[in-house]
Amino acid sequence: MKIFYKVMTYLVFPVIIVGLVYLIYESVMEPVRFNKEVERRTEVSIDRLKNIRTLQEAYKSKTGRYISTTDSLIDFYHNGTITIVKQIGSMDDSIAVARKLVKREIIEVAVKDTLLKNKAHVIDSIKYIPFSGGRLVQMESVVKQVSGVNIPLFEAVIPYDDLLIGLERQLIINLKAEKEDMGRYPGLKVGDINNPNNNAGNWE
C-alpha cells in the first residue's frame, strides 16, 4: 500500500498536475493565438479590398457605373484606360493666362501605368480570399434609386467563414456572433449595395 501511495505521489500526481497546468495554459493561449491570426489575415484582406475599391472607383469615373465581377475588374486593370486632364502652365500666372498660354489637355492613359503600379504583381489575385484555399471575394454592383436619383453602388465582402478557415470553429462562431450583435457584417466589407456609404470599409 505504501508503494502505491509513493507511486501516486511521485509519479501520477505530478503528471496530472503538469497536464492540468498545460490545459489551463492552452485555454488561455488559444484565444490569444486566434486573435493574432485573425489580425494577420484581416490586414492582408483589407489591403485586397482597398485595391478593389481603387479600381472600382476608377472604373466608375470612366463609365459612370461599377463592375460586378472581379474578373472584369482585373481585365480593366490590365487593358483599360482612364482619362486624365493635364494642365500646361499655371492658373496663378496671370501673364500666362492673359496670353492664353495656360491650357488643359485631356489624355487617355493605361490603368496599369497609373493605378496600383507597385501592386501589379498581386492584381490577378484580388479575386481570391486570402488564406481560404481559393474561395472568391463576393462582389456585386447595382444602380439603386435614392431620393429619386439613380446611384451606382457596389460592395465586396469577405466572410469570416471563408477568411478564417482552419482556425478554431467555436472562436469563429463567437466572433461572428459578436459582430452580428453589434449590427455589423460578420467579416470584412467595402461599399454597400443597400445603403450608400461612400464606399467605406467596415474596418474604417
Image (tube, rainbow, N blue to C red):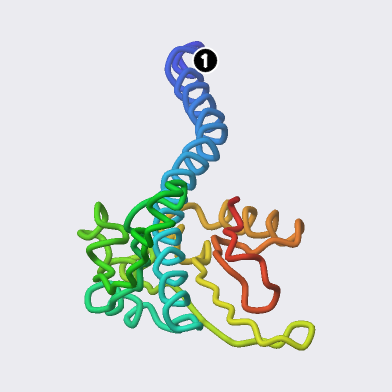
Judged from this view, the residue extending furthest toward the left is: 121
Question: In the rendered view, does 115 fall on the left or right side of 184?
Answer: left
Other-residue count near label 1 (Cα within 10 Å), few / some / many at <14 / 14–19 / ≥20? few
Q: Choose between 184 and 98: the one closer to the eye.
A: 98
Compared with residue 100, is residue 96 higher up or lower down, i.e. above or below? above
Question: In the rendered view, does 72 fall on the left or right side of 1?
Answer: left
Count of all numbered marks drawn on residues in the image? 1
Query: What residue is pinned by disc 1?
Result: 5
Residue 130 shows up from this direction = no
Identify the residue at image location x=50%, y=82%: 64
Q: Position of residue 94 (x, y in %)?
A: 46, 49
Compared with residue 102, is residue 73 higher up or lower down, i.e. above or below? below
Q: Amino acid at mark 1?
A: Tyr
Q: Position of residue 134 (x, y in %)?
A: 31, 70
Question: In the rendered view, does 204 fall on the left or right side of 123?
Answer: right
Question: In the rendered view, does 63 fall on the left or right side of 155?
Answer: left
Compared with residue 145, is residue 175 higher up or lower down, i.e. above or below? above
* Label 1 residue SS: helix
Q: Position of residue 196 (x, y in %)?
A: 67, 72
Q: Position of residue 128 (x, y in %)?
A: 34, 69
Identify the residue at image location x=34%, y=53%: 89
